[in-house]
Every structure is written in C-alpha cells, then in structure tokens.
Image (tube, helix red, strand yellow):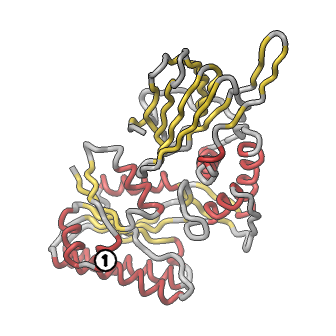
Amino acid sequence: MLRIGITGQHGFVGTHLYNTLGLYPEEFTRVEFQKKYFTNEKEMDSFVAQCDVIVHLAAMNRHNDPEVIYKTNLELVQKLIASLNRTESKAHIIMSSSSQEERDNPYGKSKKEGRETFGEWAKEAKSTFTGMVIPNVFGPFGHPYYNSVVATFSHQIANGETPEIQVDGDLKLIYVEELVAEILKVIRERKNEALYTVAHTSEAKVSELLDFLQNYKSQYQDRGEIPSLNNTFELNLFNTYRCYMDIANYFPVKFTQHTDPRGSFVEVIRLGVGGQVSFSTTVPGITRGNHFHTRKIERFAVIKGKALIQLRKIGTDEVLDFYLDGNEPAYVDMPIWYTHNIKNIGDEVLYTNFWINEFYDPEDADTYFEEV
C-alpha cells in the first residue's frame, strides 16, 4: 500500500485528489498535511518520512506583488527539498507545474524553476520525480477570482452578478477529475519524467464558457430543466456550475401542481438528456441512500408522504436538511461529491420518484457509500 501526502491538500486540486484517493483504501493511505508544516522543520520531516509519494501542489497563484509569488513558490520547493535531504527520503515526488511556464511572468517562472530544481534533486538523490505541466483546470469547489475563470463566472452568474470578459482568449482546459486521474496514473506507473506534459481535454473561448454557464442559469437554476449535455465537457461544466449555487436555500423546489375534480397533475422533470427514472416506496422510519456520486446528476422528487433529505459535502461536517411533503410536491437535486440520503419521517408510506442521467451499470456505478 502506498502512503501518499499532498502539499496543498486543502486547495482546489488537493481536495479533489485527497477525496479521490479515499475511494481506494486498499491501494492508498493518505498522510495528512497542514500548511504550517512549511514553517516547522520537525513537523515537515515527520510528514516527509511517512510518505512513499508526495504530490507537491502548494503554490501561490495571485498576489498584488508579482515578486512575492515568485519567491514564495521557490521557497516552498526549497523547504520540501531540504526536508527530503534531512530525512534521506526516496519518495516519488510529483510536482504540478503550469502551462504558464511558457509565459514571461513571475508565476510561470517560479513553476518552471521549481520543476527544474526538483529534477536536479531527483538526479542527485537517485529518486523518482515527475514534473507535470498542466493546462487550465476547472471543476467544482474552485475559488472564484483565484482558481479559474469558470469558477469566477459560475459564482457570479449563480449569485445574480454580471460577469465581464476582460480578454476573449482561447482556453485549453482539463476537468479537475480528469487531472486527478492523470495524477493517479503517474503514481501507479511511477513515471520518472522531469517534463511530463498533461494534454488538455477540451478547448473553448471565454465567451463560449460564459454562454454555456448563462444557459445553465436560465434553464436549470431558473426553470428546473436539465439542459442538453452533448459531451463529457458539457456534463463536467454543468456539474461545476451546480456547485456554485446556494444549495442550502435553493432546495427544495416546489413543483407546479395542477388540480381539478379528477385529482392533480405534476410535471416532474424536463430533460435535455436521457437517463433512468425510478420509483420507490419507503415505509416509515426507513432511510435510503447514504452514498455520493462523482459525475452523476440525480433528482429526488417526493410525491406522497413526508421525507427528510440530507446532504453533506465530502470532507466537511455541515449537514443540509430539507423537509419535503407530498401535499406540496417538491424536489432536491444531488450535487456531485455530496453524500445524501432520504428518510421517511411520516406515518404513511413515502412515494419518491428518482431520476438520474445514466443507466445503472454495476461495473461503473459511480456510487460510493458514506453516512451523511
């Protein structure tokens, strides 16, 4: 079993990598890292000594003084190398660099020089090093105004702000889970390459990204419709956008109920995609679910009875409670990387309609069990 540590564990890519490693408990052990280790040699040495693999993600992306970015990123590399030398570690080092290496800016220079410094250390220490040069990364939980234009636009649009395009450039992109899969490949194959260029998986102009995200706002957030998702990139972009909505206050969404002497009629969902629709009954006191998905879109619609739907983002403690009553039919959609369940809290049988955008495949279920 490989013991893996991640500097920058609590950052955007670090969080996704850490959570994904947790899906393979028989293959990987995660060694906890805290930012304060960089200022405490004893704690840093203890961390390094435990690791078979260290993924160096810690870096400063933005600062008012470009020189601070340059110095900080090189210092982080030097402090990690100093600890590797003190502990005589032979850990496989993986560093995330950036396609900005090609640009004449302090961030790009710091990443390139840091990668080259690690390469020199690996030669002298006779250890393994992979310097990953990575394109623009987007995905859920990125920090707006910091990690990516997708994060910034998604945050602004979902919260009623007006985005502005500064430069309508053409962006080469990779979804964060695709990047994590590439890192896992590097770990498993123990790649020893000082320059390992990660290919982008999609390409779009800034204005095209904005059009997609504004469409998700009008169709999904405003009208509850699942938009057409024509490829994996559009699915990933849509799942990213959903995570910037105010989930705690947006759900549950009440359906429009049409009633006449015959009874009532409720339209459950409008779809631009396919998928699978299911129906369930749940007896009082029983809870279903307690699992999460990393790519699937899912809707729970309560049509009869009383239910408590709970969501919790993986890696956090906050639980979101949503109370639904079939007398006022409503739905809650499940964001990716949120474990969720539904419990019958009434005295009668609970009737629930489930929609998910993929047919169930037991060989690739994308369903991971964890209590809310």
Relative placement, left or right, of 181 versus 357 is: left
Q: Label 1, on which residue? A: 38
Residue 233 visible here: no
| Residue drawn where x is 63% and y is 27% of the image | 325
Rendered position, 96 above or below 248: below
Q: Nearer the viewer, residue 251 or 115?
A: 251
Q: Nearer the viewer, residue 314 or 131?
A: 314
- Label 1 is placed on what type of residue? Phe
| Residue drawn where x is 30% and y is 80% of the image | 39
Quarter in which the C terminus is drawn: top left
| Residue drawn where x is 73% and y is 30% of the image | 255
Query: Residue farthest to the right?
Result: 260
Secondary structure of residue under mark 1: helix
| Residue drawn where x is 51% and y is 30% of the image | 342
Q: Nearer the viewer, residue 9 or 341?
A: 341
Mark 1, residues whose alpha carbon is within 10 Å: few (<14), some, or many (≥20)?
some
Q: Looking at the rendering, which quadrant does residue 235 occupy?
A: top right
State the image coordinates of residue 127 (x, y, percent, origin top left).
Answer: 22, 69
Residue 268 visible here: yes
State the image coordinates of residue 75 (x, y, percent, origin top left).
Answer: 36, 84
Relative placement, left or right, of 4 versus 147 is: left
State the image coordinates of residue 359 (x, y, percent, origin top left).
Answer: 55, 27
